[in-house]
Image (cartoon, rainbow, N blue to C red):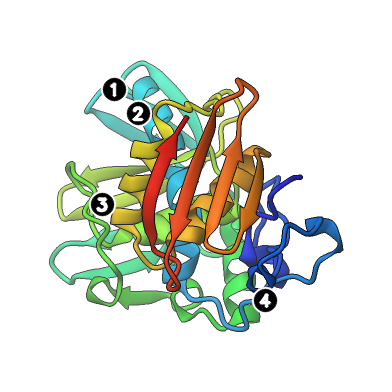
Amino acid sequence: MTLPADRLAATRLAISPGAVNLVDRANGTRDDVRASPPFVIDKPTLDVMAAAYAAVVAERQIAFERLAVAEIWTADLDDRQLHIGDRTFEVSFLGSAADAEGTWLWGWANAAFGVDHVATAPISELVTIGQKYDVPELTTPSLPLSALANPGIHGPGHGPGDTLAVVACGLLDGSAYYAGEYEGGTAYMLVTDASVPRPPVDVAGLPLLIQSATAMFPHDHRLTVETYLGVHGIEATTYGEFLTAHFDSGETISFTFDERGELTDLTRS
């Protein structure tokens, strides 16, 4: 059966292809998930959203960074273009993190752009989601970086702003995001370029990917796994605290979670 991957879909927050409702696991059966009631998160938080898409976005980031290896970058946001070395990518402008002020400013709230600018209009759906589900981080024009979780991503410019970038990339189904450091801060851009390939599932590397993703965004390990499998359309069986993913190669990965949804064991066979 196909794993119902994403609790956020039950509240219409899962925009990424492949995300579907999460079956009620409490009954401890292997019911056909399409006939089962969905899990609903009444008030999804930013941290839950980040956890949901942590592995999906981390995988895309790894693939994108193989293409964008140069350290020098420039952007022409009037044309929605990001230039990294000799490569050019289509992007939308998410926002910026200011070092001195310690604040995040959404691109649509930046006086140089506004809500109707060609580079910021594509991210307006984030505001709609934030308003509908009362997620203030998605609707507040500027907020302190100290109010955001810092996932601990290494590299120049990375910091708490990555939490917002991961959520945006997941909800808007971006190819990746780019954190471009400049004097005084970091500009975050959502890569929307269709020429950037979506990475295939690396079964051998998936355990490390999941472990890294749940370390960065530890708020719901099970949701991280389920969203990843759902976005990729990977079949799985679930029984109580156990979940087994079945890959086309014939391999399986079994996950065990505790009552809080934390990953306690992972076995590839």
Q: Disc 4 to disc 3, how far (Cα)?
A: 35 Å
Q: Position of residue 211 (x, y in %)?
A: 33, 46
Please say if the residues under marks 2 and 1 sit with CB atoms less than 8 Å apart.
yes
Q: Nearer the viewer, mark 1 or mark 3?
A: 1
Q: Nearer the viewer, mark 2 or mark 3?
A: 2
The kind of residue tagged 3 is: Thr
Left or right of 108, for residue 229: right
Q: Residues within 10 Å of mark 2 (few under 14, many from 20)?
A: few
Please say if the residues under marks 1 and 3 sit with CB atoms less than 8 Å apart.
no
**Which residue matches tag 4?**
40
Q: Disc 4 to disc 1, how far (Cα)?
A: 40 Å
Going from N to C along the chain, the mark reached first, 2 or 4, is: 4
The quadrant in which residue 125 appears is bottom right
Going from N to C along the chain, the mark reached first, 4 or 3, is: 4
**Which residue matches tag 3?**
186
**Which residue matches tag 1?**
69
Viewer-side residue, 44 vs 2: 2
The kind of residue tagged 2 is: Glu
Left or right of 167, for residue 118: right
Residue at 41% from the left image edge and 39% from the top image edge? 267
Q: Is residue 101 above or below residue 133?
A: above
Q: Disc 2 to disc 4, how far (Cα)?
A: 35 Å
